Image: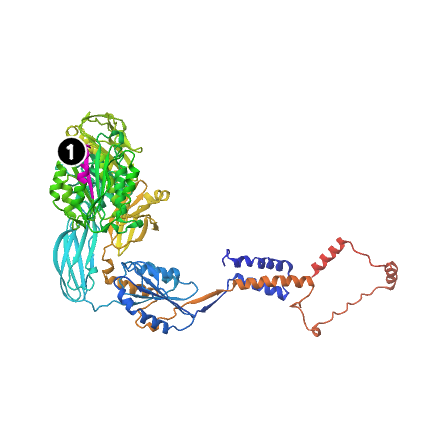
Amino acid sequence: MNFSSPEFFLLLPAFALAGWFWRGLRLHSPLRALMLLLAVTALAGPSIRRQKNSLDLHVLLDRSDSTEDLVDGNLPEWRRLLESSKPGRDDTLRFVNYGAEVAELGSDGSSFTGSRKLTRSGLALSTIAAQAASDRPARVLLFTDGFSTEPLQEAANQLEARGIPVDFRLIRDESQRDFRISRFTFPERVQIGEPFLITVLVRGSEDGTIPLVMHRNGRTLMETEVTVKDGTGSVEFTDRIVAAGSYEYQAEIRPENDAHPGNNRNSRWIEVAGGPGLLLITRYQNDPAAKAFESQDFEVRTVSDPSQLHPGMLSGARAVVFNNVPAHEIPQDFIKALDFFVREQGGGLMMAGGERSFGSGGYFQSPIDPLLPVSMELKSEHRKLAVALAIVMDRSGSMSVGVAGGKTKMDLANAGAANAVDLLGPMDQVTVFAVDSEPVKVVPLTRIENRKNDINGRIRKVQSAGGGIFVYTGLKAAWEELRKSKAGTRHVILFSDAQDSEEPGHYEKLVKEMSDGSCTISVIGLGTDRDVDADFLKDIAKRGNGRIFFSDRPMDIPTIFAQETVTIARSAFLKDPVVTKATGRWAEISPKPIDWPAELDGYNLSYAREDSTVSLLSSDEYLAPLVAHARRGLGRSAAVSFPLGGDHSQRVREWDGYGDFLQTLGRFLLGEDTPPGIALRHRLDGTRLTLDLLYDPELWSDKLAANPPKVRLKDDTTGIMSDPSWRRLAPGHFSLSRDLEEGSIVRGAVQVGSHALPFGPVTVGSSVEWSFDSERIAELRTISAQTGGRELLDLKTAWLRPPYVVETALTLPLAIALLVLLPLDALLTRTGWKMPRISHHTKPKEAVRKPRAAKTPFVPETKQVIAAEEKPSPAAPREHTPSERSSRFQRAKDRK
């Protein structure tokens, strides 16, 4: 009996009535005896159980890429068979489509319009478990090829708890010629230099020899062949990696006339763990900073070719140092990964000075900018030279293509040019051209002064015309305008589509003429460095002594314009010697005093942020920060504004404290070691990522109870971050699961107090939908048997009723009956109507014997006379007092 249910409150009058019965002892009333019987019965919680003769049949249709045609072709026949075999009017038939998402089939039989990249059978089954009516029997019929891209066990447990069987029918077409990479396995994590085994399992519909190519981080590792016999073939080989980080392996088979080329590739990442890792990015040969870090037994990985950087290199690294490398040489995906690396994964970041660093290197408004403890934008009052800037914008037909937010590529290019104008000072000059087959002078060479609003208004009105961009024509028009300027710096920003840059003309001669006239050229290419016209644009930037940027994300265009403008107009590397001034704040990094160099050869002019700590200042008019540090989330950042190598670094390299300074700064960047007794494990099953946080309860239970662990995930492909919740499975074990999108690359970190446990990157291969792993079919058969289902070959048997008993509680009807009888009893009592009493002592009249008369004792006559004389004469009956009546009533009751 649920004591919080409405039935319980309805029975409260029955409880009061039972107490009244007991007090009044009137159970001989049949009505009240009946009421008492109903109350006792209701308290027992009676119910009626019966089999329900109806069924809701939920038909799930696998609409993923691998089964789309098979479902579309057979659906009308399946629907006809199921409708014709429906046994009763109370039975219902429901069709549900699913792929990477779930959507109910329209009444008109319309096709599935959702994403088909994945087969999320687990999600579809869980949806049915949540939506099925609780008061009706249900059954699931699954039409699929059986190759789910996610585990099914959790959904099976939900359906089993609901008593819903899962039937299935496999619809894969085995008649097509198809070879596929069924399995691609190797360890998820190894140590530096540790050999590991890589296995590639290939399955095919026929025997043969198939070419196999293996790549690592985009470079070909090996080419071989795999022999498929009896439908299966495999290749095994070993590899070892001598540097820490994460590495992507990709296996690719190249069969001829293959039915499903989408399952011919597979990719996975491996993490190579090492000691405390420091990633040094430098252009210096024999960088002295590397030697200083290595002398402290740091595990230093030096990268001298920045174009080879990728986010996987951050795995195993605990700090990243940029040593005078310009931003345009760093891949954008690596730069964007640094914010999560520092703030969430607890990494360290340092930038050292030089002519290609800080604002001079194009880092203004980059993802690195807010991480540093200094601001890079040069204040207007500190600028010494005016700039004449020419912007040449592509307005060809390709610029009319729409992008996110209802904008076009042209809109974003206009916004980028406007950003550039906003960053110029009153003394600067600007001219703007929009080019397709002819240049259109949008803004003639104009001094900025107070005209920014008017200039930007003209720029934002530029619209796409048609055809391609004639690059030579645009550059020639820009140079003719810049020739008129006497500014100390003359610069051209060329924005062009890397797929459609036409009419190079004699650009070599034109660019040389511009370079001889002290004019530089930078290029922003919309696309990638592999596009058809990319090499042409690279050559222009190289000959023009400028920078080259490529981005296939139009939303990045305004930021790139701003970075380039700051580089040429609002940044400064001061080459004159400067005297230093200590602040005494170095003690926040190390208690050991440091003897700073008295003078430096040059530095990047910047400004300390409010939350930074400055240890060393310049003593010139700027009082600029030379050494500063700050906390960023769980991580740390530092800025050393003077060069550590190359030009303008002689004085600092001769400094006796050079090694100790970098070693101490390196320890600060690396942070504290992970405390003992806690570890993180991750694994990927299809598209489902599972994290397990394991800890020693004796060491960590109290800490985690006061400050529960937090997890943060970031998808590098979309930039979306999420905070999934943990489940506590047992003492010492937290776990969570998260479904990932196909092709996604995910990094994450678990925050435990002030420490971070990083992991990743983890990737879901682009061919997961086509992997056709036979273990998935075995799992489908297992969960079908677990729920009481079967493989359905004859659709006419789909309407089999599962054991489903409906239980109807009688407590409420009994309580209502009591409420009806209670006022009836009260009415009968008030009106005086009496029901026949039930007596258990009544006997037949003839059976009752009369009592024998008592004998009169003998009394002498004289005594009788005297007694008669003394006997008082009869008088009228006297009325008894209340106390006497009460005493008499009590004596009568006692006699009974």
- Residue visible at 23% across and 41% down in the picture: 432
Residue 486 higher or lower than 178, as above or below: above
Above or below for 505 versus 776 = above
- Magenta segment, which residues? 478-494
Q: In the picture provided, is 239 more to the left or to the right than 426?
A: left
The colour scheme applied to this rendered structure is rainbow
Nearer to the camera, 436 or 360: 436
Q: Residues within 10 Å of mark 1 (few under 14, many from 20)?
A: many
At 33% from the left and 45% from the top, the residue drawn is 709
- Residue 483 drawn in magenta: yes
Q: Say which element carries label 1.
A: loop
- Please provide percent x and percent y for residue 452: 29, 37
**x, y percent for residue 797:** 34, 72
- Asked where in the image residue 415 lies, by quadrant, the reply is top left
- Going by the numbered disc 1, the residue's amino acid type is Gly
- Image coordinates of residue 536 in percent, x first then y, are 14, 46
State which quarter of the image contains the C terminus: bottom right
Q: Is residue 547 visible?
A: no
Residue 510: within the magenta? no
Residue 371 coordinates in the image, percent (x, y): 27, 38
User: Position of 107 compared to 427: left or right?
Assistant: right
Q: Is residue 695 above or below residue 453?
A: below
Is 2 or 129 nearer to us in this picture?
A: 129
Please count the marks in the image.
1
Label 1 belongs to which residue?
645
Q: Hey, which quadrant is residue 575 in on the image?
A: top left
Find residue 263 and report its image quarter: bottom left
Q: Nearer the viewer, residue 469 or 724?
A: 469
699 or 338: nearer the viewer: 338
